[in-house]
Amino acid sequence: MKEQKTILNKNSFVEKLNTDLKNGAVIAFVTDTVWGLGCLPSSEKGVDRIYEIKDRDRSKPLILMSDNKEKLFPYIKSTNIKAKELADKYFPGALTIVSEKSDLTPNYITSGYPTVGIRVPNNKFFKLLCQKIEGGVLATTSANLSGHSSAKTYEEAKNSIGSMVDHVFDDYGFMCKGLESTVVLVNDNIKYKILRQGAIVLDFDSH
């Protein structure tokens, strides 16, 4: 991607974006699967706004996404080798790994559950976005109103939630595939458990 073709090349915009995110801003962006909503994991105000925007059930947690798995590992227990093995194999890609959270992960992201989902989307614009955001990690969910289909294009995201968020980023031609990620639960005590079948089919025989 030629960075000069995106708004993220403008230093003044990036500075304002980071300031806004610290103050609870919510943004919409393309990923490799469907469009997402996100805020800083450290912003409880931003997380609250995501639930309000979507009218999302508070018992449904958000997930953490980044451009780099190394930025996500501090949010899960360091003892979970299985989760890291899956990340090594499938990140970046359409797999969300749910694992026991570390103390770094706020309860308001996980709806009080002891686990958190992590993912590294395989999308060049999303990667650039994370590289411009301080910390490089976003607390996320799909860009749509609860009960409605996930947005699969810029127009769908703009029309469904655009008026309620602080910024909807152009996809700059790096469009999503429209199929949501596979969600797998992994911990030290049980075998892998598929919570949602999506774009990736896991081969459990190989683990």
Image: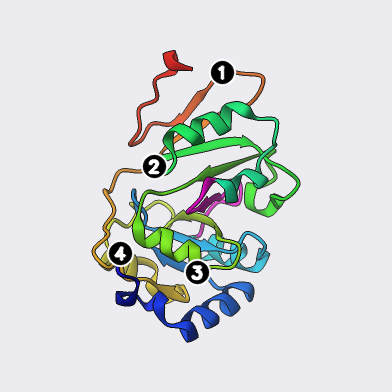
Q: Which tag, 2 or 1, sits closer to the chain's start?
A: 2
Residue under label 2: 93
Residue 98 coordinates in the image, percent (x, y): 56, 36
Element carrying mark 3? helix
Seen in the picture, residue 85 relative to 165 is either above or below; the reply is: above
Name the quadrant of the N terminus. bottom left
Q: Amino acid at mark 3?
A: Lys
Residue tagged 3: 132
9 or 29: nearer the viewer: 9
Helix, strand or loop at mark 2: loop
Distance of mark 2 from mark 1, alpha carbons?
A: 21 Å
- The residue nearer to you, when weighing 205 against 154, is 205
Label 3 and label 1: CA atoms lie apart by 37 Å
User: Residue furthest toward the top?
Assistant: 205
* Cα–Cα gap, marks 2 and 4: 18 Å
Give the Cα distance between marks 3 and 4. Answer: 14 Å
Q: Earlier in the sequence, mark 3 or mark 1?
A: 3
Label 1 SS: loop
Which residue in the structure is indicated by mark 1? 191
